[in-house]
Image (cartoon, rainbow, N blue to C red):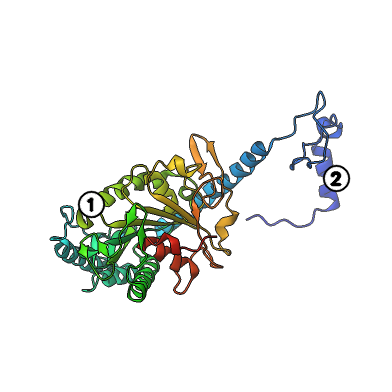
Amino acid sequence: MELRGKPTAAGRAKAARTTPPDPALERPGPPQPPEPPESAPSAHSTHSAQPGEPPLPTPRARFLRRLSRTLLAALVTAAVVVPVSAAARPRIPAPAPAVLAPPTTATLDKAYTANRANAAEASRMAAAHGDRTRAAADHAMAAPSRHFLTFDGRGQGLAVEVLGDLAHADRVAVLVPGSDTTVETYGRFRAGAAALQNHLNSLDHRHGVHGVHGVHGVHGVHGAHGATARPHTAVIAWLGYETPGTVSTTVLTTGRAEDAAPPLKRFIRELRGVVGEKAHVSLLCHSYGTVVCGRAARGLDVDDIALIGSPGTGADSVSALRTSARIWAARGADDWIVNVPHVHADLFGTTVGFGADPVSPAFGAHVFAAGTGGHSDYFKPGSVSLDNLARIVLGDSSEVTRA
């Protein structure tokens, strides 16, 4: 580093002698026209561009300008955050997932056992690598009480867990999570699934199945597996895709959702092989998970799709989803997702944004109440949203509180 003091009088005189003035800097340039205003004219303004004036920017042009700046900021953030994180956190070794045939009611226990063993081995490998956080997460998944249809400890990790008795279930909920859900943060996602399963059990015991109607008919007291005093429920926490990071460019686009749609479709087909065609299956999608469900919806063999805390699905309306499922939507009063603009634009060959707001009347979903909760409160025990989601899972649409 060079240290500089205050210039002396002699030094200033020398600099004046040896540095000739730049004529271009001394001569004033031509007056520049003022920049166009950043905001649009008010609704009462009658001003229009005169000949020779630059045209006023349209609302779409202003949005694209702001979106470009946001995207650039996100790209810069990702360029800084991602490499630093990768350097600080090297890839954790883990075994390849167990090779299993599509599950049936007869092979569920075999799948559960194989995936617990895989999680235990992943925990040992992570511990040997010095990653205590991942080792603890994997170890928890290897507990004898856990039932995984899928476990893959490599990378961010994938896991599909069953809560309840899937072999005898005639009401099944599949939860699809949003951004930043990994093996290490899986506990939060599972807590929501457990809260739903507990609430379903409490409703079952209190009300049985009286008045419980399916979307495509009345189940009454006859479940998918014969006569029963009450429905048998199961909740599946489906972390079957690599979720985007909240601080990343991937969370702004449909890329991860497009990658996730085929495995979600395949899983629903395999699920039908376990529970049968008469079981009532609901897909409950949260945040970026609603984009995944929007991409997978076409022809999907489910009865209900619930979109909660959604930034948009990539579709402009329910009909554009091209599904026979009943579409529900909700947003909590304190959910920050309300501030996300429901638009989409093509930038540099990539679609940014997710389109129409699923809770808007124009979208056409059945909008239900979600209370005063925030973005992470939809499965909070005792909440209005949890109770309504449980009613949807049970097929009791008449009991769902509308917004």
Looking at the figure, which quarter contains the N terminus? Answer: bottom right
How packed is label 1: few (under 14 Cα within 10 Å), some, or many (20 or more)?
some
Q: Secondary structure at mark 1?
A: helix
> For this view, does 368 lie left or right of residue 94?
right
Q: Secondary structure at mark 2?
A: helix
Residue 94 in the image: x percent, y percent? 24, 60
Percent position of residue 60, x then y: 64, 37
- What is the quadrant of residue 150 in the picture? bottom left
Task: State the residue in front, 6 or 81.
Answer: 81
Q: Position of residue 332 (x, y in %)?
A: 54, 63
**Is 89 on the left or on the right of 77, as rendered?**
left
Q: Residue at x 61, y 39 (%)?
A: 64
Task: Name the residue at 22% across, 54% down.
Answer: 276
Dot label at residue 56: none
In front: label 2 or label 1: 1
Residue sitting at the far top? 51
Q: Is residue 324 visible?
A: yes
Which quadrant of the rendered structure holds the C terminus?
Answer: bottom right
Q: How many marks?
A: 2
Specify the amino acid type for callout 2.
Ala
Residue at image location 20% in from the left, 67% down from the top: 116
Amino acid type at image mark 1? Glu
Tell me the distance, in whole angstroms, between the alpha carbons under discs 2 and 1. Answer: 86 Å
Vertical placement of residue 47 versus 282, above or below? above
Q: Is residue 143 above or below residue 220?
A: below
For residue 270, which numbered disc appears in the image?
1
Query: Who comes first in sequence, dot 2 or dot 1?
Result: 2
Q: Residue at x 53, y 36 (%)?
A: 346
Say above or below: 119 vs 29: below
Q: Which mark is residue 13?
A: 2
Residue 155 visible somewhere in the drawing: no
